[in-house]
Image (spheres, grey):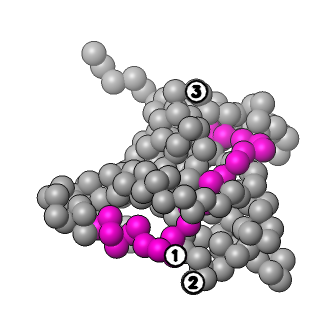
Amino acid sequence: MAQQEAKQPVFDPIKLERLKVESEYPMEKADFDELLYNARYCEMAHINNKGYPIVTPMFYVVINGHVHMSSIKKYRYKVHSVEARPQMSVCIHNDGMELRHQKSILIVGKGRLHDDDAFMRKVHWEVLDKYWKQVTEPKQRQAAFEAVHTPLRVIIEVVPERIISWDFGKMLQAQEPGVWFNEAYNFPNPGGGAVKK
């Protein structure tokens, strides 16, 4: 079967200026779930003690529909900030190189800290399984787990108050289904590489 031709984008300056994110270009449910559970890119934003928004990349897993991340007490300002000012957000996105393939989820809510050992073990094993698939030998897996599951660790759960998603292709009426993982890595040269000028 012949490959379907990509939709031609429609550049409407009035529409682009007045788009309503939640109602006019949210992600489709299947793409939303695929991105939420399987993306590797997550940025967490919290407010520091001087009132500045601080954004950091984080490993994350989804448990019971909520984003969970691991951090460290005493040595990471983000934990102290979340304790004092729990308002936070996370952005989860793919690496679509073309606008029609770029999709993102914004979760706005409050941070909840967990230091229960059994729950932290669950999160840390899931993080290990998600981000270090090349670590397969049992002794190596145990060593990796012990390096992550340490006494000063704490889990940050994002309790959502508002969730927004973007399918950027819909802005130009050129959306395509899918989440396009690894597209940026493979563009413009197979296997990745610097853009040639």
Q: Is residue 16 visible?
A: no
In the drawing, what numbered circle is on residue 152?
A: 1
Task: Give the residue at mark 2.
Answer: 75
Q: Is residue 162 visible?
A: yes
The quadrant in which the C terminus is found is bottom left
Task: Give the residue at mark 3.
Answer: 29
CB contact under 8 Å: marks 2 and 1: yes
Residue displayed at 51% across by 76% down = 152
Disc 3 marks which amino acid? Lys
Circle 2: element type: loop
- Mark 1 surroundings within 10 Å by alpha-carbon count, few (fewer than 14), some (14 through 19), many (20 or more): few
Q: Main secondary structure of the magenta part?
A: strand
User: How many callouts does the rendering have?
Assistant: 3
Q: Which residues are magenta?
A: 144-167
Tell me if residue 193 comes above or below residue 34 in the rendering: below
C-alpha separation, residue under disc 2 versus residue under disc 3: 38 Å
